[in-house]
Image: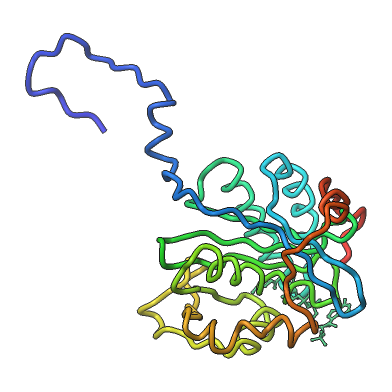
Amino acid sequence: MYIDPPEKVSQEQITIDVREIEPLLEAPPMDLKPWPGAKITLKDGRQMYIREAKLEEAPMMIAYMKRVMEIERDFYDVVGARVLAELLGWQRKRLKDPYVLVGLINGQWVGFANGRLMSQDINISLHTMALARGGRIGAVMYYTKAYYAFEILGNKEWWATYESYNGWHRWGLGMAQPSYPWPEYQHELGGARVYYVTKKYWDSMVKNYARQMVGADLDFNVPDELVKANEVMIAPEEVLV
Ligand SMILES: CC(C)(COP(=O)(O)OP(=O)(O)OC[C@H]1O[C@@H](n2cnc3c(N)ncnc32)[C@H](O)[C@@H]1OP(=O)(O)O)[C@@H](O)C(=O)NCCC(=O)NCCS
């Protein structure tokens, strides 16, 4: 937009360094406590290690997600496309306070869960994905990010929504999550219903979820060998979903 200046000016052009624009586009980070890393034993006895994804892993994750979003089954396409956008948002610093957790078995990437903090109190669940099916890996990944929200970050509420039947079944129904009135409240993922968990409800009911789903809890006592075995994340050669 242009409007003539109301006074004579000595410089008609002002050059702006993009580094001066960036602080306006990038949200100042809240300095989140990191996810410490945990292991869990799946039903079939395999040990899954859940750690934060590293920013340098983003290109590999994005490349793999481009393939996952081609799968027109069980809503992997729409969830894949949205996860791809969120990974780019994380990489390019266009998400406010994001966190990205990955589930790994012997270095292989099998699970994904991410979210972001709307405020000190409200944690927005973005997406969860099982990249290998049948092990309840997705169920555990979602539980893990809610654990991170309530137990480590000290958030008061968890806001989620569901794009797929499997997601709704796992957590909307599986955690008996209430929802806020709709359309007054809308989740940022497409304006769907906001399903929520409060800290009180987490403490009284939801904390037992992983034990019920896979018969084990998160274990933060992780041996060095397991950390080492999962230091380098490798995407499956094929899309396995
Ligand atoms: C939702 C999701 C994360 C749940 O993952 P999960 O807990 O690991 O569960 P799965 O989807 O693998 O399996 C769901 C059920 O179907 C069965 N199943 C479905 N497809 C299967 C397959 N290809 N192989 C084996 N089992 C399969 C599982 O055994 C499981 O049964 P169970 O309830 O007895 O354990 C996963 O379905 C997913 O990534 N979906 C696409 C993305 C998505 O919808 N994300 C959530 C957005 S709301």
Q: How is the image coloured?
A: rainbow
Towards the viewer: 34 or 157: 34
Towards the viewer: 29 or 112: 29
Question: Which of the 4 image quarters holds residue 102?
Answer: bottom right
Residue 12 located left or right of residue 81: left
Towards the viewer: 213 or 115: 213
Q: Residue at x 55, y 64 (%)?
A: 152
- Name the quadrant of the C terminus: bottom right
View extreme (top): residue:
10
- Image height check: is 239 above or below 53? below
- Name the quadrant of the N terminus: top left
Residue 218 located left or right of residue 236: left
Q: Residue at x 92, y 75 (%)?
A: 45
Q: Residue at x 75, y 49 (%)?
A: 61
Q: Residue at x 51, y 62 (%)?
A: 153
Towards the viewer: 179 or 120: 120
